[in-house]
């Protein structure tokens, strides 16, 4: 007996029809930049383990124009991911109550953004001066 | 009933998402934009400094956590986004995505052990 042929409505391009869906897909596709950056670091780590020459070659390759362009795109996507991550935090966190009142959504988003700025300054300081 | 492994991968996705939201833009800017463009001194990421970082305890932990959690976050999200593009995901795609994240973590751990302790 052959398998039943169930009609499946085609869904190709569904997300292009609406700006909200487009933003959703861009947000989801930021994962490609996050994966690519992790792999980039992993390759750098492997080159580091191979010695000074291999590591310097890896650094020189990062400075090629198309590598810079791709990494700038990755930077934009990861920055968009960061923004959306804090934007949905009021929905992804359980309700937080302070003094019997629910903490407003805007305060949660602002707290996330401020935490990101502080953490980034810490990374910047460690990278430049430690 | 068999216990679901969803909470594990969901937690790793969330932890990676939070870490990459907190420091991702700054890390990407410094390591693969500012250093290659010469916006900061080359010495911030030259061989001796990178080696010293990878041979310190805190450096090893930072490198491992960033690579591993970024991979778990990105690959978990990719796994779910495939569905939105009409790819019928099943146990195979799931095993591939999570397996790659586990593999990347193991490779990073191996390299960090190989790099020694200075």
Image (spheres, rainbow, N blue to C red):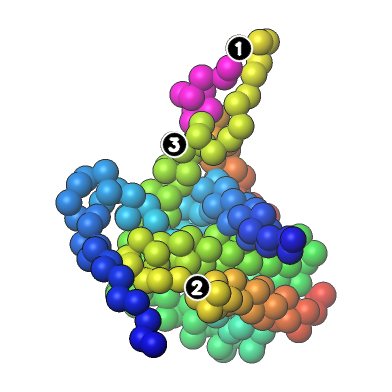
Circles 2 and 3: CB atoms closer than 8 Å: no
Rendered residue at 51%/19% (across/down):
A104
Q: Which residue is mark 1?
A: A101
Asked if A130 appears above or below A37 in the picture, the reply is above
Residue designated by label 3: A87
Name the quadrant of the N terminus of chain A. Answer: bottom left
The Cα atoms of the two marked residues, 2 and 3, are separated by: 30 Å
The secondary structure that dominates the magenta segment is helix
Q: Nearer the viewer, residue B82 or A60?
A: B82
User: Mark 1 Cα within 10 Å, few/some/many (few <14, many 20+)?
Assistant: few
The residue carrying pointer 2 sits among few (fewer than 14), some (14 to 19) or many (20 or more) residues within 10 Å by Cα, namely few
**Residue A121 higher or lower than B98, as above or below:** above
Q: Secondary structure at mark 3?
A: helix
Q: Name the residue beneath numbered marker 2.
A: B90
Distance of label 1 from label 3 (alpha carbons): 21 Å
Q: Is residue A128 visible?
A: no
Q: Are discs 1 and 2 located on one and the same chain? A: no
Give the magenta part as a residue range: A102-110
């Amino acid at each position: 007996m052959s398998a039943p042929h169930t009609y499946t409505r085609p869904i190709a391009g569904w997300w292009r029809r609406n700006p909200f869906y487009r933003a959703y897909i861009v947000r989801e596709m930021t994962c490609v930049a996050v994966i690519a950056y992790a792999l980039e670091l992993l390759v750098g780590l492997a080159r580091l383990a191979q010695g000074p020459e291999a590591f310097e070659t890896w650094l020189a390759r990062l400075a090629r124009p198309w590598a810079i362009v791709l990494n700038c795109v990755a930077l934009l996507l990861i920055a968009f991911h960061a923004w959306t991550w804090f934007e949905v935090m009021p929905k992804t966190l359980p309700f937080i109550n302070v003094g019997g009142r629910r903490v407003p959504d805007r305060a949660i988003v602002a707290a996330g953004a401020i935490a990101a700025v502080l953490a980034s300054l810490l990374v910047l300081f460690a990278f430049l001066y430690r | 009933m068999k216990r679901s492994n969803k909470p594990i991968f969901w937690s790793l996705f969330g932890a990676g998402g939070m870490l990459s939201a907190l420091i991702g833009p700054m890390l990407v800017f410094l390591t693969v934009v500012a250093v290659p463009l010469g916006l900061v001194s080359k010495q911030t990421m030259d061989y001796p400094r990178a080696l010293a970082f990878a041979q310190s305890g805190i450096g090893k932990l930072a490198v491992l956590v960033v690579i591993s959690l970024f991979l778990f976050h990105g690959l978990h999200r990719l796994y779910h986004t495939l569905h939105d593009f009409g790819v019928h995901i099943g146990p195979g795609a799931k095993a591939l995505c999570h397996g790659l994240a586990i593999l990347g973590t193991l490779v990073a751990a191996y390299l960090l052990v190989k790099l020694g302790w200075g």
